[in-house]
Amino acid sequence: MHYNILKENLQNKTAKVGVVGLGYVGLPLAMEMVKGGFTVYGIDSDNRKVESLLDGESYIQDVPGSGVADAVGSGKFVPTNRYETIRELDTISICVPTPLSENQDPDTSFIVSVVNEIKKYIRKGTLIVLESTTYPGTTEELIQFELEALGLTAGRDFFLCFSPERVDPGNPNYNTYNTPKVIGGTTEKCKELGVTLYNNVVKTVVPVSSPKVAEMSKLLENTFRSVNIAFVNELAMMCDRMAIDVWEVIRAASTKPFGFMPFYPGPGIGGHCIPLDPMYLSWKAKEFRFYSKFIELAQSINDNMPEYVLNKTAQVLNVYAKSIRNSKVLLLGMSYKPDIDDLRESPGLEIYELFKKSGAKVEYYDPYATSFKDEHGHIVHSVKYDPVALSEYDCMVLITNHRSFSYHELAEMGVPIIDTRNAFADIKSDNIHKLGTGINQQDVKVLVGA
């Protein structure tokens, strides 16, 4: 009975749908649900987020404030911090963070907290979809088992699915709507209801046989990237030692029309997914006495890239007869990827701390991420873009290749620049020193009059 009623309500869009966690995943999803014709209740424990949304303001770069204002004004989107709202909901999509602990173990406390609230207020016939990235088995272990302990049965009294988020902040081509959405249910009826919900919200739904398959598919996607990025980062360090331009090597290899996919080195990996997801998989595998050497090795290489950037900078400054200590260093960009303000797991944050601990007078410039908190909780602000002031730094380190940067103007300042992203590829200048190419000491000696 519950199945038939909910399916009909989803099809005619009279179902009240909920999204718990209104961050980079939840808010875009909620807006797509509104566009799909549903009345959406957004639940978040952060009062500042709720108040911002009620005022028609968006704190997510990819979600226009005008869209939020229209949705709130029409009553189609109801932001709240009250978990009691769950009593009124027909569906609940859980989009809360899943970070790592200090010991690099999965921290599922946010999921557990939401499940505890659901246990208080759930009504029979509710569809629950977990979207937070996590290890295979989470959906059953943390949600199904908990609800069935209350005497409810999955597939009859409640319906449960896992559908991994695939959010790529700042991507101009792919968003929540046109990115295919994988979904797996704990029973066939659960899957069918999940598919019915999301068919109204996204362009393409990809059903799979179980939540575990859906959970594993997300981890595969990001572990694949982590391992390949680690390999090319190691290749960059090798090319640096051999004075071979790794960027030219990658361009040459990319001309092969089959059997090759280009990945690019950098100062480290950032964002919520790639630095974290592989460790979820590695942690879960150990439960089965399986130890993933690829994942652990890739994590180690990628985690050491900030230290490598520091050492590369020290080598460049040394050629200019300077040391890291007391040098004025400017980091160009702080967000984890270009043209956004997202600082989650950005390698720039660690690089900033490494330079500080090495005695450098380090500052940063980022037109998007205008401030952050350092490891001591102090707020660090971006400097203003002033060509005269910037030309007084001893060196610059390009962390994030924002398209808005004036690369030719930066190069013409004559300050040594360590380019970790090949952002200055089209500029021929002796003061540009790219990651993975070695250091052209002969040209530098000419510059400093040696």
Image (cartoon, helix red, strand yellow):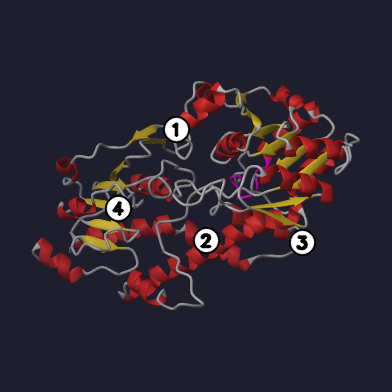
| Residue highlighted by disc 4 | 397
Residue nearest the viewer, comparing 191 with 204 = 204
Res 319 → quadrant: bottom left
Task: Measure the C-alpha gap from mark 4 to mark 1.
Answer: 23 Å
Q: Amino acid at mark 3?
A: Phe
Residue 400: x and y, percent? 36, 51
Name the secondary structure under disc 1: loop
Residue nearest the viewer, comparing 382 with 363 = 382
Task: Measure the C-alpha gap from mark 3 to mark 1.
Answer: 39 Å
Mark 3 vs mark 1, foreground winner is 3
Marks 4/1 in contact by CB < 8 Å: the verdict is no
106 inside magenta stretch: yes
Is residue 73 found left or right of 193 in the rendered image? left
Quadrant position of the C terminus in the picture? bottom left
| Residue highlighted by disc 3 | 288
The earlier-in-sequence mark between 4 and 1 is: 1
Q: Amino acid at mark 1?
A: Gly
